[in-house]
Amino acid sequence: MKKTVLQLETLTCPSCIRRIEGTLIKLEGIETAVVKFNASKVEVVYDEMKQSDESVLKVVKDLGYKVISRK
Amino acid sequence: MKNILKKHGYIIFISSLFILSMIFNELNQSRLVSFIIMTLLTIFAGFHIFKKAFMDLKYKIIGIDLLVTIAVIAAYMIGDLFEAAAVTYLFTLGHYLEKMSLEKTRSSLKAMMDLKPLQARLITLDKEDMVSLDSLKVGDILLVKVGEKIPTDGIIIEGNVFIDEQMMTGESMPVEKDISDAIIGSTVVTSGYLKMRVTKVGEDTTLSRMIHMVEEAQDSKAKTQKFMEVFSKYYTPLIVIFSIFIFIMTKDIRLSITMLVIACPGALVIATPVSFVAGIGNAAKKGILFKGGDSIEKLSKGEIVFFDKTGTLTKGKPEVVEIKTFHISEEELIKIASIGEAYSEHPIAHAIIQEAMKNHVDIKDKPKNYQSIKGKGIKFSYQDKIYSLGNERILENPLMGEYQMAYHKFLNVGYTTLLLANENQVLGLIGIADTLRPKTELLMKDLKSLGIKKTVMLTGDQEIVAHQIANQLGIDNVNANLYPEDKAQIIKSYQDEYHTIFVGDGINDALALSYADASVAVGGIGKDLAMETADVVLMSEDIGKLKDAIKISRKVKINMIQNIIFALSVVFFLMIGVLLNQVTMSLGMLVHEGSVLIVIINAIRLLRFDIGGNHVKRLRTKQLHQESSHL
């Protein structure tokens, strides 16, 4: 299991939480996905065999969110 | 100018298109040009919305973007181009403004992150080097000069300095620090210089942990907030059904799509979190850490405050508070007693030696024939005389007359009292007590004026000491001789009737902290356990900040209620307006986005105004001062 934290641009609507969490959690190999609305961060724990930092990043970008940094 | 264009170019572009659309809409001529302009605006302003709506569909989520998209497409299809364009534009503009203002509510955290210095002066065998903060390791030796920020947490190994810890504790008076004192990264040396040994780096430092805690706090979900999220989860789909129902009933597509747009719960959902985020941020700047929205709600409701005594109301360090001598001078008494206690590790001995050092008494000599007698005191000889120091049982003969009276007078006011005697007579009495922290009396008055119904002191100390302190402070109830688990039981016994607040220093009172409805830990810096357990942490030792914390929690709560009431009434009146056919789709969107902005701006008030004490104002004038002196 690996944890990655993405810093997004400022999130404005709480519906973003469900959009991002809901999308990520349905993917194979994602253990947990938590969006911190006020900090505008996404914390993802995933199985390295099935996902990678890049694949997680791509999904979030595809949803229409700018990713500022990754930890 | 270039910067503004680059940063806001997109908004300027779609705003220009919107103004053109309005002009052509009014003129009502050249239909082709208006068609082109309005379609362009719908596409450019709505691109993000449509994309998100598409994603939502894919993942079966009903969100606001989907509602807006349906409404825009429907408006477009019935030929209401201006409405479609205006709604997309207002929605995008609204979000843009919300983003900017939301960033503001979260600015306190960013300000904390900006506190970190970038470089440190590393001392190696023969030279000093400026190195980046990331390269520091535990054990490194650093030099910090006057006016500089201390790079990271450590211990002073050389130098005597005054340090401004305001950014961490909210305490504006600089604190004196000496060799072997712990210092905190990002605080500023205001006079002197120091050499330090690094004890913590990176994520482990106090500042990093504080930032992390504030971040966690801002995203922890309070009860009200959870309710709002659940509400909006079911509310949005319900609105879709309701709109379809209206369409079936009235066959008025305009009415039903207007319903879709205005019913979005934007302001309602954001009402609670923005107030909490702004409140938590402002409090953190004053050295008050709320663990989350829940903690704010709990503290705001408090009606009865329990205090731990030692270390919370008092300094937790015994001091010599009164001396009575017979036949010798005070200085001599302290000198002989200090020399006698030279080998003792007891806190009482420490208090006597401190007193001697404070008065610059020469205590270099060591006692001879030192003997410690358990439960009584010590015997020793100094300059060929034999002395006894301890309680009355250390004496060979019972106390009589004026000695006895003086001794009992000391005991009755709650002092731990030591007698010093030579072979023939009693030479004097030393009264030692744990003294009150400054401003505690004022705090009790302040709490009453805030409407706190009762104050209670809980202590493991003996009855007489406890009552002495309670009387001095004006505390309503006292419970003495308690074990830690008793404190929790007493708090529980009040909980049916009152909302309880417990204030402790985090030592021996973890249980009480966890039992009270709201718990406050004082002097949180460096006390990890207390920081973890308590709902609210006062970073400095200044217990007076409790008043500020309660005030802030109430202001935040009021702000949140204002936001919720406002958001609900906007939705309510808009609905009525729509049903009476008085509100168009774009007007609905304008009011809707406007209400979100108003809610955010209302929360920003929590940042600007000095909601706890007079601290923020002072800081701000100081900043202005600095800025103007730079010009």
Image: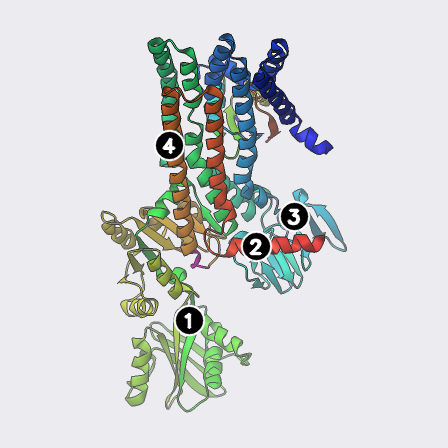
> Looking at the image, is mark 2 or mark 3 earlier in the sequence?
3
* Separation of marks 3 and 1 at Cα, in angstroms: 41 Å
Q: Which residues are magenta?
A: B542-546
Image depth: mark 3 or mark 4 in front: 4
Residue found at the very far right of the displayed protein: B126
Who comes first in sequence, dot 3 or dot 1?
3
Image point (34%, 59%), residue name: B449
Mark nearer the N terminus (2 vs 4)? 4
Circle 2 is placed at which residue position? B619
Q: Are marks 3 and 4 on the same chain?
A: yes
CA distance separating discs 3 and 4? 47 Å
Q: Main secondary structure of the magenta part?
A: loop
Location of residue B492 with respect to B87 vertically, above or below: below
Q: Helix, strand, or loop for circle 1? A: helix
Circle 4 chain: B
- Horizontal arrangement in the rendering, residue B13 relative to residue A22 (left or right): right
Q: Which residue is mark 3?
A: B117
Say what amino acid the circle numbered 2 marks. Leu
| Amino acid beneath label 1 | Ile
| Residue linked to disc 4 | B569
Chain under callout 1:
B
Q: Residue at x 37, y 60 (%)?
A: B446
Whether residue B220 appears in this view of the structure is no
Which residue is nearer to you in this view: B150 or B23?
B23
For marks 2 and 1 on the same chain, the one whose residue lies earlier in the sequence? 1
Residue that mark 1 sits on? B348
Secondary structure beneath disc 2?
helix
User: Residue under mark 3: which chain is it in?
Assistant: B
Q: Distance of mark 1 from mark 4, alpha carbons?
A: 64 Å
* Label 1 crowd (10 A; few <14 / some 14-19 / many >=20): many
Q: Amino acid at mark 4?
A: Ser
